[in-house]
Image: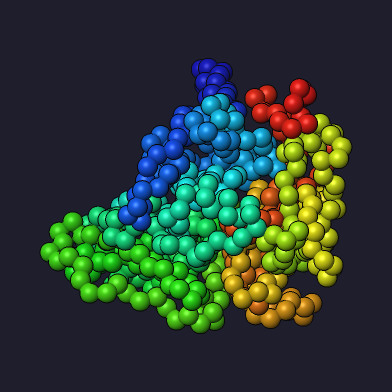
Amino acid sequence: MQKLNEGFTGLRYLCIFLCIVSTVNAEDPYRFFTWNVTYGDIYPLGVRQQGILINGQFPGPEIYSVTNDNLIINVFNNLPEPFLISWAGIQQRRNSYQDGVYGTNCPIPAGQNFTYKLQVKDQIGSFFYFPSIGFQKAAGGFGAIKILSRPLIPVPFPDPADDHSILIGDWYKSDHTRLRRIMDLGWRLPFPDGVLINGRGDGGVAYNVEQGKTYRLRISNVGLQNSLNFRIAGHTMTLVEVEGTHTVQTSLSSLDIHVGQSYSVLVTADQPPQDYYIAVSSRFTSQVLNTTAILRYTNSGKAVSGPPPPPPTTDITWSLNQARSIRTNLTASGPRPNPQGSYHYGQINISRTIKLTGSASIINRKQRYSVNGVSFIPADTPLKLADYFNISGVFKVGSIPDEPTGAAPYLDTSVMGADFRDFIEIIFENRENIIQSWHLDGYNFFVVGMDSGRWSNTSRNEYNLIDAVSRCTVQVYPRSWSAIYVALDNVGMWNIRNEFLVRQYLGEQFYLRVYSPVMSPRDEYPLPQNALLCGQAVGKRS
């Protein structure tokens, strides 16, 4: 009998072991999407425009996913011009071939399709996708991305009654093709005509809520240039997440959201049952753009009346202080069960400091914008393909300096080299009178400091080296600086760009080539079998 019990005990442990092995080896779930991209008539500001629709929708369909999901997205381009989608904030771990910008991917030709194969590896949070070439973002083609935590990973707030994605952004009444022609002629664009909330103009959207319940709002600024302030009449918001990082939960009456940024807030329907304004306004502009939506209680007994709540002061200091107050919740779990504060970024030695300054200039009698004096021009072949196939003459690593030189600005296909596993400091200096907003593909970074004036070595004394927020897009206030720390743990060709779309289109961007000499799938996946080939890569095979 004892041996029989021992046998059952051994069998039980074997079953447990096999269950563990099967769980570990189980492939992460797949989600499949088929998107048809077309032109269609839209009327967001009351006039007919040519918009870019995905499956007939403007904005495009929301991507719902869970940490580590594989997203298989088959995009059919039915436009009469090439098309390319990028995924703002999705890190494409070891796989910049899926990033969807012209430095990594050939555009999808008219009448053809391409299947993206993404994995939201070790990510949670609120993001969005958008067209990345030809100024097509000004016509639509953008949509929300929502990444939920896995069921067993604790989230630092109760499940909300509902979870809404809200896309806000400034907008032109003119078609993107006309706007593109103006820029290609070397002229400046006029100020945008309005602000949209989920593709609708003033009063065009309503959100229903039930008395006493709490809701999550994921708000992304998918606009073209302007910082926007978001607020709800009579309600406070609790900030809980920024671009994949759970934050210290702070109560807000309004929130500044700069171009390309995403935030999550909780709102409780704790006011008398009626309709309330949701107000969005442009910030720090001589001409203020305003729009509204409605927060509607299901038992509402009163429509909105009177003016919407006004925006906060136009003093930059208010916005700067709000930005500094956003901090990482160190005890909360992120995409993994370990606390977010377990990575002690402030104790790591910096291996390199890069200073980046964006500026306006006239080159060859045309309006251009540059970074450290170099105005980016696309090559005839995506840089990542040229790198993979060793095609010479497409770009040169080191074609942009680590800091401004003061030399006359010039055109080039600017690529900066960096070493895999380096830990670097990047200083964004803004010497102009507008707000800049900078994004880095492939990474989140720690926003360790920001202040007015010029950065100096003594500015490091004010850095937050404990609980700085980790995100992928940072604002730089007028005549100010922002500093970030980045752990270069993702091999690939990664775009650094000003999210002000006109400036980006006219050269205020470049690529960071994070290089590992070890050609191993542990560091970087091989070229996808379905990769589109164009330019000098046509006819080549991996």
The foreground one among 40 and 489 is 40
Name the residue rendered at 38%, 61% in the picture: 266
Name the residue rendered at 50%, 74% in the picture: 285
Residue 285 appears in view: yes
Q: Quadrant of the C terminus?
A: top right
**Residue lying furthest left:** 301
The foreground one among 94 and 49 is 49
State which quadrant residue 432 falls in. Answer: bottom right
Name the residue rendered at 53%, 17% in the picture: 4
Residue 123 at x, y percent in the picture: 56, 47
| 445 horizontally vs 226: left or right | right
The foreground one among 189 and 295 is 189
* Residue 124 position (above or below residue 325): above
* Residue 230 position (above or below residue 74): below
Residue 303 at x, y percent in the picture: 17, 65
Name the residue rendered at 61%, 76% in the picture: 433
* Residue 179 position (above or below residue 41): below
Residue 483 appears in view: no
Instruction: Name the colouring of the figure.
Output: rainbow
